[in-house]
Amino acid sequence: MSNRTLNLTDPLYQYVLEVSLREHPALAALRKVTHDHPYASMQISPEQGQFMALLVQLIGARRTLEIGVFTGYSSLAVALALPPDGRVVACDVSREYTDIGRPYWEQAGVAHKIDLRLAPALETLDGLIGDGHAGGFDFAFIDADKVGYDAYYERCLTLLRPGGLIAIDNVLWGGRVALPAEDADTAAIQALNRKLHQDQRIDLSLLPISDGVTLACKR
Ligand code: CA
């Protein structure tokens, strides 16, 4: 027995998937096609997708934000968990990557729930704020360029309603956050982690799931 998070050996990880993963066929197909992509490690794990879908369901989310879509696995996981009139405003700059996911959004019958905005995310988020949507979102997932994380966090916090939830990916950054920063990405994540710890606008939990996910609930 251990009260610390277990090291996931391959057999234990397989067991976790075997006894808990419920993956929609379109998600499984998209994961398969992304597996061979040179940046495949940018895709979230299936159990993380299922976890985020459960969070979205738990808070009764209808309007969500995604910063960093890649090939669209997390957008699809969230869209599947939303009610029929739910929407994901999905921010990314790459048509090439998001085009990989679109057929699977359609296959799953939820493409209409994913409002893809191909532009720098800050432009999209500032546009939403400018158009009066502050406080109008329930959930946000931040998984994009790490140097931009703090700016994305601030915009998402503005756009969320009180009680809304932000999930921030890669907050353990392969363990590098615990060492002196040798690059801008690590330094940016370290700075945000320390800021969130003191941020009285949120309640938080840093979960050592996948590469580390911080949940920040807006007060
Ligand atoms: Ca990530």
Image (cartoon, helix red, strand yellow):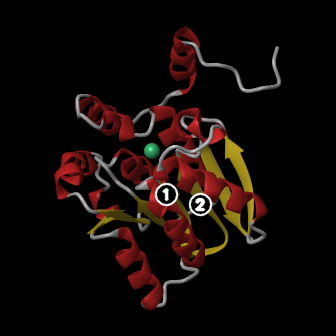
> Which amino acid type is marked by label 2?
Ile
Tell me the number on the disc at residue 165. Answer: none
Residue placed at 52% from the left, 12% from the top?
10
Tell me the number on the disc at residue 166. Answer: 2
Of mark 1 and mark 2, the one earlier in the sequence is 1
> Within 10 angstroms of label 2, few (less than 14), some, or many (20 or more) residues?
many
Pick the front one: 26 or 130: 130
> Within 10 angstroms of label 1, few (less than 14), some, or many (20 or more) residues?
many
Contact (Cβ within 8 Å) of mark 1 with mark 2: yes
Q: Is residue 198 above or below residue 21?
A: below
Asked if one can make out residue 197 in the rendered structure from this viewpoint, the answer is yes
Q: Is residue 28 above or below residue 215?
A: above
Q: Which residue is mark 1?
A: 142
In the rendering, at what x and y percent does residue 126 appear? 43, 82
**Where's ligand 1: which quadrant?**
top left
Residue placed at 41% from the left, 56% from the top?
145
Quarter of the image holding residue 9? top right
The answer to whether residue 76 is left or right of residue 71 is right
**In terms of secondary structure, where does tag 2 sit?**
strand
The answer to whether residue 146 is left or right of residue 208 is left
**In terms of secondary structure, where does tag 1 sit?**
strand
Quarter of the image holding residue 219? bottom right
